[in-house]
Image (cartoon, grey):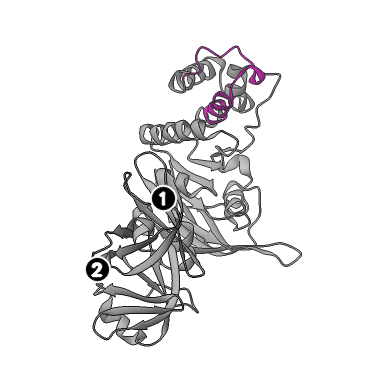
């Protein structure tokens, strides 16, 4: 096991493209850290620099306290799992699992012991003689994970390992990866564009956009207190509702929008918002914090038209039209409403988010 340290690591390609713009983060020994962001944000480039497959343009990379900027991949004591499995089709499961150990001259008896242990753990012990073509997608991914595990490296690097699987297999493999990490406690860096994977797997999450780290924190801290508009809009399914308007503080908090005034009560951030009186802000509302009210309820913050009602089992998503804005409300099943109906909604004052519309940074 080992710590991983990135100190102002940059990657600039010869054409001038800045893939990673000064990333600094400390990954603790045994931590499962997730790098998440949209395509092209720099997360895979960052992982490849840690692996030694890309050379940093600037900054310092350390694994286990040792600077590794110039250390070749084979000497970094890391194992990487790729998106496309990268299994040898002519080899059996057992041969694929043990291939890396054979290259390192590990004795046959030790290879057999490690392969058998990992195969039992991943429930592959009945498929050791099978070749990849005879395996399901989930089994192939387990072989790819197992091949990394038998190495017993200091650091595991996983580059979107579940993206080729269907939804059901992704769910089961997420559980598998989380279970394996709890059992082995290996330092693990996991790259994904899927924010659900990031939220469910990561002990901490690094959110990237356009080559820059936007925020680093635990999953729920990111969800409850996003540092800027990008993080607020990226993490959460459905995404946070964002509304721009002018903030008035007379007789309670009111956001004046082109669609109408939104009454917001007295949120905890009210003192910090004094400086934003009569100025433009962006209001953020999580779908679960925009709840439908009865027609005669006096506490309504806004009225919106129901366009589509999506029942998904234990909850319902209400797709709403508020002037030119599309909003989403998450509520319990059993709501008596029909598309085209105008509905009244309240907010949770303690769960409002406010952002600077120019800088995108959080207010309060």
Pointer 2 residue: 299
Q: Where is residue 243 in the image (x, y as percent from the top left)?
A: 44, 71
What number is the disc on residue 317?
1
Q: Nearer the viewer, residue 223 or 154?
A: 223
Q: Give the range drawn in magenta.
A: 123-146
Indicate which disc, 1 or 2, sits on the residue closer to the N terminus.
2
What number is the disc on residue 170?
none
Query: Does residue 53 sit above or below 360 in this rendering?
Result: above
Q: Nearer the viewer, residue 127 or 174?
A: 174
Q: Which structural element holds mark 2? A: loop
Q: Where is residue 353 in the image (x, y as percent from the top left)?
A: 36, 69
Any magenta on residue 135? yes
- Which residue is depicted at the point 66% across and 52% down? 54
Any magenta on residue 267? no
- Which residue is depicted at the point 23% across and 69% down? 298
Query: Does residue 313 sit above or below 304 in this rendering?
Result: above
Quadrant of res 278: bottom left
- Which residue is depicted at the point 45% across and 57% down? 340
Q: Where is residue 338 in the image (x, y as percent from the top left)?
A: 41, 51
Q: Nearer the viewer, residue 259 or 34?
A: 259
Query: Does residue 197 sit above or below 16 in this rendering?
Result: above
Measure the C-alpha gap from mark 1 to mark 2.
21 Å
Compared across the picture, whether 92 is left or right of 337 comes to right
Q: Nearer the viewer, residue 3 or 269?
A: 269
Quadrant of res 105: top right
**How many C-alpha atoms fall within 10 Å of the one at disc 1: few (<14), some, or many (≥20)?**
some
């Amino acid at each position: 096991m080992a710590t991983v340290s990135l100190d102002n690591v940059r990657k600039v390609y010869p054409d001038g493209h800045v893939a990673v713009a000064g990333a600094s983060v400390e990954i603790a020994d045994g931590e499962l850290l997730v790098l998440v962001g949209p395509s092209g944000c720099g997360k895979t480039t960052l992982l490849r620099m840690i692996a030694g497959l890309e050379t940093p343009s600037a900054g310092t990379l350390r694994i286990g306290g040792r600077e590794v900027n110039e250390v070749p991949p084979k000497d970094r004591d890391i194992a990487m799992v790729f998106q496309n499995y990268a299994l040898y089709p002519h080899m059996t499961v057992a041969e694929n699992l043990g291939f890396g150990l054979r290259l390192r001259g590990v004795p046959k008896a030790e290879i057999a012991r490690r392969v058998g242990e990992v195969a039992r753990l991943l429930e592959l012990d009945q498929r050791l003689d099978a070749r990849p073509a005879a395996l399901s997608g989930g089994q192939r991914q387990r072989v790819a994970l197992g091949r990394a595990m038998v190495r017993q490296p200091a650091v595991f690097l996983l580059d979107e390992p579940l993206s080729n699987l269907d939804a059901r297999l992704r769910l089961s493999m997420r559980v598998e990866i989380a279970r394996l990490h709890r059992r082995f406690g290996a330092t693990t860096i996991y790259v994904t564009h899927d924010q659900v994977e990031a939220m469910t797997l990561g002990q901490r999450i690094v959110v990237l956009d356009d080559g820059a780290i936007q925020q680093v924190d635990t999953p729920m801290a990111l969800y409850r207190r996003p540092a800027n508009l990008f993080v607020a809009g990226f993490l959460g399914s459905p995404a946070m509702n964002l509304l721009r308007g002018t903030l008035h503080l007379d007789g309670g908090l009111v956001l004046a929008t082109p669609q109408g005034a939104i009454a917001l009560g007295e949120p905890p951030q009210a003192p910090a918002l004094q400086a934003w009186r009569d100025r433009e802000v962006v209001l953020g509302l999580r779908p679960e914090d925009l709840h439908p009210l009865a027609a005669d309820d006096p506490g309504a913050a806004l009225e919106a038209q129901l366009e589509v009602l999506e029942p998904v089992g234990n909850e319902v998503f209400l797709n709403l039209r508020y002037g030119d804005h599309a909003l989403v409300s998450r509520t319990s099943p059993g709501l008596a409403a029909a598309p085209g109906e105008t509905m009244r909604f309240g907010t949770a004052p303690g769960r409002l988010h406010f952002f600077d519309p120019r800088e995108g940074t959080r207010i309060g």
